[in-house]
């Protein structure tokens, strides 16, 4: 049976560079893995008042079930103001609740930060890791995945240059190793 990998892209933007990098990585998984995008743009802002058995939004339940069904989670995110985009943080919060039913728990994760700039989303990468520690997600440590100057490595069709395929493959391979250990 193939193992689903939830691929969560931190950007909602149609032409997102992060999404293009994610697509390139999804092609590099072994055939017994099934990476698929899990969207979060439709999630209402997290509010404990509506997160009750009577009122819980269907979007929350659907999102949580997709995370629970996945063998692991691959995050590919841009950096917003040296942190992660608010929508991504909202998704993390939604998945973490209700108290005692953390959908992220024990799901092996990998974090890839993407930026047109030279600092490569380092801030976002590590802010995200801070939450993943608390959520109890074993997270790939090496190789680190900071994709800077992203516009220089993507062609007009959204494919990465030859040299970058090998780098992305090394991240996917190490992540698959991590998944196989759990
Ligand atoms: C940015 N951008 C940005 N880039 C960066 O490297 N560090 C940062 O702190 C920020 N901050 C930031 C805040 C906000 C609100 C926006 C909209 C953008 C630029 C960002 O990297 C760029 O827009 C990317 O193209 C966004 O990623 P996607 O949508 O292409 O995946």
Image (spheres, rainbow, N blue to C red):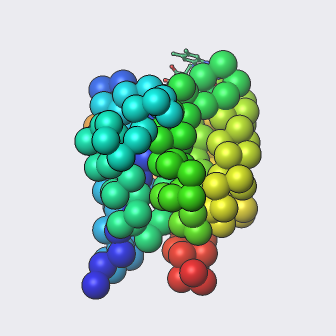
Q: Is residue 6 left or right of residue 73?
A: left
Q: Quadrant of the N terminus?
A: bottom left
Residue drawn where x is 57% and y is 81% of the image: 182
Residue drawn where x is 36% and y is 33% of the image: 43
> In the rendered image, is residue 1 in sight?
yes
x and y percentages locating residue 55 in the rendered image: 32, 37
> In the rendered image, is residue 147 in sight?
no
x and y percentages locating residue 107 in the rendered image: 54, 66
Count of picture labels: 0
Q: Nearer the viewer, residue 82 or 102?
A: 102
Residue drawn where x is 67% and y is 28% of the image: 83
x and y percentages locating residue 123 in the rendered image: 72, 33
Q: Quadrant of residue 66?
A: bottom left
Q: Nearer the viewer, residue 53 or 173?
A: 53
Q: Nearer the viewer, residue 148 or 11?
A: 11
Find ligand 1 in the image and state its quadrant.
top right
Q: Is residue 18 above or below residue 176?
A: above
Q: Is residue 178 left or right of residue 91?
A: right
Q: Nearer the viewer, residue 99 or 95?
A: 99
Residue drawn where x is 72% and y is 62% of the image: 141
x and y percentages locating residue 95 in the rendered image: 48, 48
């Amino acid at each position: 049976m193939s193992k689903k990998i939830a691929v969560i892209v931190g950007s909602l933007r149609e032409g997102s560079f992060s999404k293009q990098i994610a697509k390139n990585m999804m092609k590099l998984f072994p055939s017994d893995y099934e990476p698929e995008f899990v969207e979060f743009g439709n999630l209402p802002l997290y509010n404990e008042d509506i997160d009750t058995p009577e009122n819980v939004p269907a979007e929350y339940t659907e999102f949580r079930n997709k995370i629970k069904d996945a063998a692991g989670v691959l995050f590919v995110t841009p950096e917003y103001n040296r942190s992660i985009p608010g929508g991504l943080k909202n998704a993390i919060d939604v998945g973490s609740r209700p108290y005692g039913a953390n959908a992220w728990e024990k799901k092996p994760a990998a974090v890839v930060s993407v930026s047109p700039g030279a600092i490569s989303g380092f801030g976002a990468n590590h802010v995200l890791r801070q939450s993943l520690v608390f959520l109890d997600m074993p997270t790939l440590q090496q190789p680190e995945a900071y994709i800077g100057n992203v516009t220089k490595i993507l062609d007009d069709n959204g494919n990465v240059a030859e040299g970058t395929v090998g780098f992305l493959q090394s991240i996917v391979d190490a992540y698959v190793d991590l998944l196989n250990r759990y």
